[in-house]
Amino acid sequence: MVDYRSFFEVGDVEDFEHEIDRQLHSWLLSKSLRLEALPTGRQIVAEGTFVDVVLDVSPDGSRRRRIRLSEPSGWTTQLTTEVGPHQPSSVWLELDAAEPGSWTATPGLVRRLVDAFDATDGLAMLRGQPVIVREDDVDDLLDVVCDPDRRGFVFVAGSSDLLPWQAWTQQVGALLAETVGLAGAYLMDPHATVAFADRVGHSHAVPAGGVRTFLPEADPAVRVDGRRHRILGPARIAADPDWKLRRMLGWASREQLLGQQLPPRFSRVDRSLQRIETETLVDQLSPGQQEIFLSDGPPAETSAREVSTGPADMLTIGPDVVAEPRPFAGLDVAVVDALQELTRELLGSTDLGIESIAAIARLAEHGHATRESVGELRARLLSDLEQIANLEDTQARLQSELEDVQLSWAEELEATSQLQDQVRHLQRELMQAGLGNDAWSEVPLEDRTNPPENFTELFERQDELKYLVLTADQRVAEELNDHDLLGNSASKAWTALLALNDYARARESKAFNQGFHAYLKDAPAGYRSYSAHGHSPVESPTVKNNGKFHDCRVFPVPTSIDPSGSRYMDAHLKLGAKKSISPRIHYLDAVALDGKIYVGYIGRHLPSPKTN
């Protein structure tokens, strides 16, 4: 399983492979490993540590090379390069961690290569430190942000005259230290920050003191596209320790590249080198006869009587009589017979000459090498099977997410159609009542819904919900952001929370005196509502009476509500038909006690007999 992946291109470099080797040797020396050269094949550089080199050369002179370091700890570092005419040179580095899925810090080799070359991902520059952007550079930065050919993120930090420049520069570098080699990093000075905002508009601007993550192919002309590009705001940066944010940004950058298919160029290189590696391993399993025998062909079939090991092995019986030769004089007869039988089985001959024994020795050596090759082939096949399984999982996940989007889209279309029908009906009623001007009047700003773009913003705006108390774990809710790039679920959650808030307001003002489910079916005029079909007042008895399912629905409340500081919350709102995560809001209606509603959970569907 690949735990780290970086790929980039470099501009014109004189003797590209020589510089690669120089950086590689320097990195190996930092690990107390020494290699004099990098020929093809395998070299053992320490006990249990070896380097494999595979080379593929095309008729046009382009060269593809793969260098793999395998360590006894279980770590594997694989560096793949391609250099050739009429194209930039490329670098691709992958790491397999000793414990798959564990955090992998930025490899020292990546930092060396990024410092040695002008590395790029599309138009984005990959550097060891953030690139400073002045006002004159803003148009170039905009090209980078909108570039459809880059694969990784581009992090853009904003600044202002109120921020100490030197300290902010150092902090941005520290925050993005674990994205080196994976993403572009840019820091705009105060004038550039203002100019960039003027170019892209509010939807894609970068706040001073904040860092924005731009996915590939940003489109400032489309306001809703701004939802794809998340903002790490000044308040969060000030509140959380740098190490935590650094790890968060590092994880996101790794997942961005690991979650993609290989670019076509790297995929082609990979297939070429994998084919050579496989052919090499197979060749080691089936050597030709010339590798076994010293002579041009196998020895002729002979009998033991015709074999002579030299005059010293002859016994003289009489002047004219010479005894039969005694091969390997001094050995036990049974041993000699066993050797002859082994020779016959392996070589098709009973000759016990030096050449035959040497051939048997080579067969033994080859057998040992064969076992190693078979082991490698087995490991590779298992790895391929795992990769196929991962691809199938990815395909299934993407298919599920596509269906989620289609279902959500169908829901929104239906809701929109119903609202349009209702508006037309009300407009006709107003016309008949002589209120034609009101029928087509604009909705006042204070009555418009301005939903949050993601769940992070939702929590930041909780003060707007006067009658709600959010005790839910914000981190759990923010996990939904990964499945909600356009903010649809966050918007729907906001609508649901507004309905809860207005319900409590209606209860306080005596405009309504029943429960929330009844409110959703018949909300008073002027109060926000939500689909009653998206609300469940209780969980099933199976969930309520099962300890495991019951306990995961117990959430924090004030001790004034429950002395234990928690309460079982089975009432919940559904945030759309997302099969893969089915987000939910669980709450406790305490309006009758203190006029509040406690929202204990916002996140993916909690465990139940169906989900398990």
Image: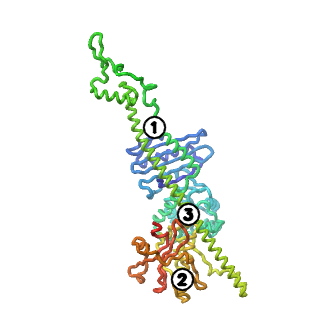
Percent of width and height locating residue 238: 49, 70
Q: Which residue is mark 1?
A: 284
Using a 10 Å C-alpha cutoff, classify the residue at mark 3 as few (fewer than 14 neighbours), some (14 to 19) or many (20 or more). some
Q: From this viewpoint, is residue 423 visible?
A: yes
| Residue nearer the viewer, 167 or 331 | 331
Vertical comparison of 373 with 362: above or below: below
Q: Say left or right for 440 vs 595.
A: right
Percent of width and height locating residue 281: 47, 40
Mark number displayed over residue 518:
2
Foreground mark, 3 or 2, reads: 2
Residue depicted at 48% across the width and 65% down the height: 245
Q: From this viewpoint, is residue 180 visible?
A: no
Q: Amino acid at mark 3?
A: Glu
Distance from Cα at disc 2 to Cα at disc 1: 76 Å
Q: Amino acid at mark 2?
A: Ala
Distance from Cα at disc 3 to Cα at disc 1: 45 Å
Residue depicted at 61% across the width and 43% down the height: 85
Mark number displayed over residue 209:
none
Say if mark 3 contacts mark 2, CB within 8 Å: no
Distance from Cα at disc 3 to Cα at disc 2: 33 Å
Q: Amino acid at mark 1?
A: Gln
Mark number displayed over residue 401:
3
Q: Does dot 1 land on a helix, a strand or a loop?
A: helix
